[in-house]
Amino acid sequence: MASGTVLIADDDSAIRTVLTQALTRAGFTVRATGMAAALWRWVSEGEGDVVVTDVVLPDENAFDVLPRIRKMRPTLPVVVMSAQNTIMTAIRSAELGAYDYLPKPFDLTALVQTVARALDQSAKAAKPAPSVQGEPLPIIGRSSAMQDIYRLIARLTQTDLTVTIVGESGTGKELVARALHDFSKRKKGPFVALNMAAIPRELIESELFGHEKGAFTGAATRMAGRFEQAEVGSLFLDEIGDMPLEAQTRLLRVLQQGEYTTVGGTTPIKTNVRIICATHRDLRQLINQGLFREDLFYRLNVVPLRLPPLRERTEDIPDLVRHFLARAEKDGLPRKEIAPDALTRLMTHRWPGNVRELENLMKRLLAMEVDDVIPLAAVERELASMPPVQPHAANAGQAPQGQDLPSFMESHLAQYFASFGQNLPPAGLYERILAEIEPPLLRAALAATHGNQLRAADLLGINRNTLRSKLRERKVVPMRGIMSSS
């Protein structure tokens, strides 16, 4: 059974009672108070092995007490609780040296386990950090899905680890990358972003590593690459799944050796850059297809971070809508409110384009509506006029037809499953999907071979009898002309 003394500070007597009972059952000795002054007195007298404190206390904010605790007793773990479940709360807790951050409401078992872990190791010494209270939130949302993201971001800002952010288009991958930089020890250095899908393949190595004068036709002067531009800062490689294999090999060498050479150069250049990358594609699938190096994947995927799509965090939509409405005046648009039933309708939409789609919709409504309150009818009208958006469409503005087949199928299946809400589709999905895929595939093979079934069968990798059987089964009428080989 666990042992040790836990100091609890929370102005809610019910929470103090529940925490005291749970920690006592787990074997801890507990002292609880509703005031920061009492907590500070106990800590300064040397009491307690772990502190569990709410942020907002009647007499003082815990974020003001935490630096004093860290200075007096740097090895005393402090677990911060808060109902202000924003990314800034999580980041502020990490910056001030809290052992962990738990958003309210939390699972009692998780809290007991956190306290037990805190007793097993000493908290790291806090690093002084400027106040971030009152600053605009870089990421909006208080849902449980986002709380896990905030906690991970808060921990990663205190490290230099390579991070791979995975998520659908429009989920805010670059916002997360910027938060990882802006609240890290590299925040005084540059944040440099490069979208792999937006750069011609033949220019990516030059963009990344720079080139020397005369390195290739058109290289009239030396150009610094993104690695050089991001020195002592962070380099964000967006859509890393679109990086050509040749550039992947050079990037792997940089990660392994910490140096690179410019295109046309011979002198190695040392680099001190944190790599953050993002993709909407399944990198493991690209590895299986031979399009992405497995060794590079493991170098980049040190800490994977998956951003949930908006349909998995619909409870964040009211906060997002209020944020976009409040920002209207900065964009020169009139300030408006939204009717409650209109807001409810926004929460039921599936949002294939995620937060970006919601933001664009709000901008249109703000620009077009004359009334001070956006009505349900306006929202319905705009949603009805919006073209369908593939959830996994490329971030570089490529049309859906520019997707590879696996990505397109993932998009199609994601929308299909989403159409059933919390339920599953009817049984027999495998056969229904094959029935959709095989007919156009058979027709395309026949068209490519001008109706020659023997050549079409060879193209598909099946024998002619199997092809004829599938044509009958899928009710595909063979092309007129050459029906078979002679």
Image (cartoon, rainbow, N blue to C red):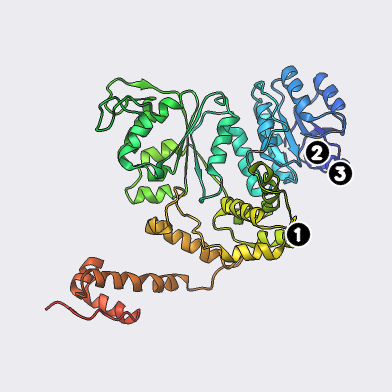
Q: In this view, does 311 lie above or below 300?
A: below
If you read the primary sequence from the N terminus, does the residue marked by circle 1 or circle 3 appear first?
3
How far from the left and from the top, in percent, is residue 71?
A: 72, 18
Q: Distance between the residues labelled 1 and 3?
A: 32 Å
Mark 3 nearby-residue class (10 Å; few <14, some 14–19, many ≥20): few
Residue at image coords 55%, 58%:
352
Give the secondary structure at mark 1. helix
Q: Distance between the residues labelled 3 and 2?
A: 15 Å
Mark 1 nearby-residue class (10 Å; few <14, some 14–19, many ≥20): some
Residue at image coords 39%, 25%:
258
Residue at numbered disc 3: 14
Give the secondary structure at mark 3. helix
How far from the left and from the top, in percent, is residue 79?
A: 72, 33
When asked about the image quadrant of residue 266, the answer is top left
When asked about the image quadrant of residue 379, the answer is bottom right
The quarter of the image holding the C terminus is bottom left
Q: In this view, does 70 lie to the left or right of 460?
A: right
Give the secondary structure at mark 2. helix
How far from the left and from the top, in percent, is residue 222?
A: 33, 24
Give me the disc on residue 340: 1
Residue at image coords 86%, 44%:
14
When asked about the image quadrant of residue 329, the answer is top right
Residue at numbered disc 2: 24
